[in-house]
Each structure stands twice: as structure tokens, then as C-alpha cells.
Image (cartoon, rainbow, N blue to C red):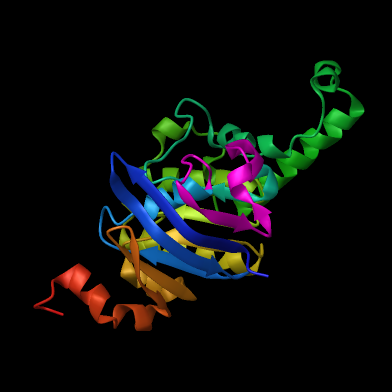
């Protein structure tokens, strides 16, 4: 069974179709890239999957579950986490505190047990902190654990957002332009971490990305969008060689 299935997804804003009859599927353990020019509808698809937007038509199923019947917090409970184009962190909190926020979807104790800080709550708190420590180790972020997010350079902030998403223990991770704003060295580090996330944690990854070097390095399959429609699906080489994709990026004369 496919991890994620999107069928005939359609969504409009003010009469303009941002997504027009888009269908694709993502297999378990895959790194699936979505590429396309600015305004192609890539982030809109992410917003529909994570239930920020409700599409006019179509279906979205995650591990057989109908996501359109779920609220955003329930999507996280099912095992789906995401990052954003624009970093969304608690600037005045430490890295450690931001990552602990990522564990909120996994809290199972009641407010009454929290109030009395029962042994069960203490055990759960220990488990949450142990998971955060594992993610800090995975992404080599221990040196930043007590720093305020506002004091970190941009690349480190991107890593914090990725780490927070991983703290939710997702089965499917949506990454919206993970390499945006990173220098070449940081992008290389990101590629290694995404491989580790796939291979060591067993997380399926769907990423929107403009850096084609990163896409070529990581993606098992790729989908190109243009004007809200699917232009091509296949391996990165197949998609890059498609005449419609070349025309969208380079112009029909160059293609």
C-alpha cells in the first residue's frame, strides 16, 4: 500500500486554480521530490495535505486514512509532520524547548496527572526528553541545545525546524524547501541528514525543492508541476529530460 495517495486534487483562490486535478502517490521509505517554477502550486499541495487548506475536489489518503476527514492536529497524531518555507519557531525559547514542543503530539497524560506530576507523568517526561536527545545527536545539534533560537544563524534555525518535526516521530515528513537559504556546505550536511532520516529512522520524505543538485542527490522519484498541473513524473533524469518541463523552466525556444 502506498504511504500517501493524492487523487484529482483541485483548489482555487479567487477563481484561479492553484492546484488543478493533481494526482500522485508516494511509496513507503521513498524520498519524493516536487519541483516546479514559483507559483506552480507546490506549497499549496503541502497545505492541503497538512489540512491548512481544504480542497474543492479530490482525495488525500495517508496509510489508508482519509485526511480530508481529519483536523490539522489529528493529521500529526496519524504520523505526519512538516516544515515551512518561512521558518516558524519560538524565537525567544531555547533549541531544547522548541524541540520539546515537537513532542506535544505524543503527550498521553491527563491534565490532572500533570498537575500532580505523578510517576507516570515523570516517566513520560523522561521518554520525551530522551527522544529529543536522540534527534539532537542525529542532527549534530548538541552544541546549540541551550541557545535561544533568535541568536542562531539562519542555517542552524533551519535545522531546528527539521529537528522539531522529527521529534513528533513522523512516518511521513513534508519538507518545504529544506535547502532554501543554505550555503553549499550546509546543503551538503542537509543531504546527509535526509539520507539518515530515511535509512536510520525509516521516515518517508516528500520535499518541495528548487535546488536540483539536492534533488538529483536524494530523490527516488520526482514530480514536476506547472500552473497547478502535473507536467511529468518519474526519475529525476526522466523529469528533467521531459520537453514540457524544459519549456516551463527555460522557455520553449531553449527547450
User: In the rendered structure, which segment of residues is drawn in magenta?
Assistant: 50-75
- Nearer-the-camera pick, 240 or 9: 9
- Residue drawn at the location 48% of the way across and 39% of the way down: 52
Whether residue 53 is in magenta: the answer is yes
Q: Position of residue 195 (x, y in %)?
A: 54, 68
User: Horizontal placement of 146 versus 43: left or right?
Assistant: right
Q: Residue at x 63, y 68 (%)?
A: 2
Residue 235, compared with residue 65, is above or below; it is below
Please provide percent x and percent y for residue 24: 49, 67
Q: Give x and y (percent) for residue 108.
A: 80, 34
Image quadrant assignment for residue 215:
bottom left
Where is the N terminus found, in terms of image quarters?
bottom right
- What residue appears at the point 44 percent right and 36 percent down from the top-left corner? 88
Query: Which one is nearer the viewer's eye here, 218 or 249?
Result: 249
- Tell me if residue 209 is in the magenta stretch: no
| Image: 166 above or below 221 | above
Q: Is residue 13 visible?
A: yes
Q: Nearer the viewer, residue 162 or 4?
A: 4
Amino acid at each position: 500500500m502506498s504511504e500517501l495517495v493524492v487523487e484529482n486534487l483541485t483548489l482555487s483562490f479567487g477563481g484561479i486554480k492553484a492546484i488543478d486535478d493533481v494526482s500522485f502517490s508516494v511509496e513507503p521509505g521513498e524520498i519524493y521530490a516536487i519541483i516546479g517554477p514559483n507559483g506552480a502550486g507546490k506549497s499549496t499541495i503541502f497545505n492541503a495535505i497538512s489540512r491548512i487548506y481544504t480542497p474543492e475536489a479530490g482525495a488525500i489518503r495517508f496509510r489508508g486514512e482519509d485526511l480530508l476527514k481529519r483536523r490539522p492536529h489529528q493529521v500529526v497524531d496519524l504520523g505526519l509532520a512538516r516544515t515551512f518555507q518561512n521558518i516558524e519557531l519560538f524565537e525567544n525559547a531555547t533549541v531544547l524547548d522548541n524541540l520539546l514542543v515537537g513532542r506535544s503530539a505524543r503527550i498521553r497524560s491527563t491534565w490532572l496527572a500533570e498537575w500532580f506530576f505523578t510517576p507516570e507523568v515523570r516517566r513520560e517526561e523522561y521518554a520525551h526528553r530522551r527522544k529529543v536527545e536522540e534527534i539532537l545527536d542525529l542532527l549534530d545539534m548538541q552544541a546549540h541545545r541551550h541557545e535561544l533560537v533568535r541568536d542562531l544563524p539562519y542555517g542552524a534555525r533551519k535545522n531546528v525546524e527539521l529537528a522539531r518535526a522529527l521529534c513528533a516521530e513522523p512516518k511521513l515528513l513534508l519538507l518545504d524547501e529544506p535547502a532554501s537559504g543554505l550555503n553549499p556546505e550546509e546543503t551538503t550536511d542537509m543531504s546527509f541528514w535526509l539520507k539518515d532520516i530515511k535509512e536510520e529512522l525509516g521516515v518517508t520524505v516528500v520535499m518541495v525543492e528548487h535546488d536540483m543538485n539536492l534533488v538529483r542527490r536524494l530523490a527516488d522519484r520526482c514530480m514536476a508541476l506547472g500552473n497547478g498541473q502535473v507536467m511529468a513524473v518519474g526519475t529525476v533524469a526522466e523529469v528533467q529530460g521531459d520537453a514540457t518541463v524544459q519549456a516551463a523552466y527555460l522557455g520553449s525556444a531553449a527547450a
